[in-house]
Amino acid sequence: MGRGVACVHVAAAALMAVAVPARGGESEDLDRLCTANSAAMESIRTFHCKVKIDDPSARFGLTAGEYWRTGKSERLHFTHSGNENQAVIRDGVVRYLVKQDVGTSPMKGHPEVTESLENGRWFWHGAIERHDGSSPFIFSPWSDALCCMSDGGKRGNVTFTEFVQNHKRDIKAVRRSSEGGTRQETIEFRFPDATCAVHLDPSANYMVKKTERKSDSPTGYSSSAEVSAFKEIAPGVFFPERVVVKRFVNGAAGSDEVFTFYDVVVNQPIADNVFDLKFRHGIRITDRIDGKKYKVNETGVPISEKVPISYASPPPIAPAELPLTETQEEPSRSGWWLLPASIGLLSVAGCVWLLRRRMRVSK
């Protein structure tokens, strides 16, 4: 969940409910659904799309992005409120390049900010760290399109099949149903404080069409994410055109968030250099693998002395939403929606840390 949809990112372990595992005919149905969904996802070997987000207030003013994926490599380029962010996952490492407006930020006068300012306004910086399996992006078109699910804790993003395997004991029912005249297959889960459901669309090769989380408490947090239309991108290969996210807190409906995917291309060659992030010459990098910060050239080679990262641990940031398996209620959104540049940290390393944490708060 980059961003996120019903199955979104939060660092909390999935709680297991006491339930009877699926058996007999249900087990056969589960195996059939998992096999069909896996085949649909495996049919997408390479992927590239652009995405537009309506209700940008929910994501730092995020309005547009572009995304590439092949194998275990991913690249995301997005803009928000005039700021620009790029992130690449490759060979188990995440690299970031950030362009931020510091015109009204207390950071503006800091020496490490001043040295990399462009036109007295734009602050360039970057970061490197290991990829832990979860999405490091502020939003992820792959998860926002329901192609993967966040399972909480250290499991990170998982496929539908992996989610089912992780929670077989929590399955309440496997059934066929119809909604709006469209046939679908539904798997219902029973967790300690919520019921959850994942709906698959047989007409779109059993891709996930909808996810739901309904809190048992009238003051709890509920959400849903639904594909309003699939498109056959290539013969036998489907992908969502539009996904609508709805949230309910204390029984009241929040604003909808709509993701529109366009210019989608699948199974076409993607140049290898797409996943080579080019840094801006002379910017400062926070290397969280080596625990150092230093300046780099365009290819990321250090061109200055490496100095240890030294800054106080920033306060924890509340998660944006909850995965299907999380049992907390939705936290207040008032603080974490602020743009990273407005936080006013006095060190570049601290700023990059905060941006990194915000990027992981997604769907």
Image: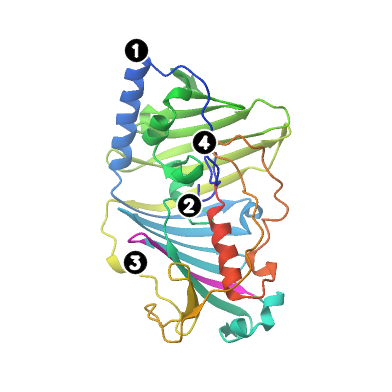
Q: Residues within 10 Å of mark 4 (few under 14, many from 20)?
A: some
Q: CA distance from mark 3 to mark 2?
A: 17 Å
Q: CA distance from mark 1 to mark 4?
A: 26 Å
| Amino acid at dot 2 | Ser
Q: Is residue 278 above or below residue 162?
A: below
* Lower sequence index among marks 1 and 3: 1
Magenta: main secondary structure equals strand
Residue 183 in view, yes or no: no
Read off the residue under disc 2: 140
| Amino acid at dot 4 | Ala
Secondary element at tag 4? loop
Name the residue rendered at 50%, 37% in the picture: 228
Name the residue rendered at 54%, 28% in the picture: 196
Read off the residue under disc 1: 24
Foreground of the two, 304 or 164: 304
* Lower sequence index among marks 4 and 3: 4
Q: In the image, which is nearer the foreground, mark 4 or mark 2?
A: 4
Q: Is residue 95 magenta?
A: yes
* Lower sequence index among marks 4 and 2: 4
> CB atoms at circles 1 and 2 under 8 Å apart?
no
Secondary element at tag 1? loop
The magenta segment is 90-101
Left or right of 167: which side holds 245?
Answer: right
Q: Is residue 363 above or below residue 356?
A: above
Read off the residue under disc 3: 274
Read off the residue under disc 4: 14
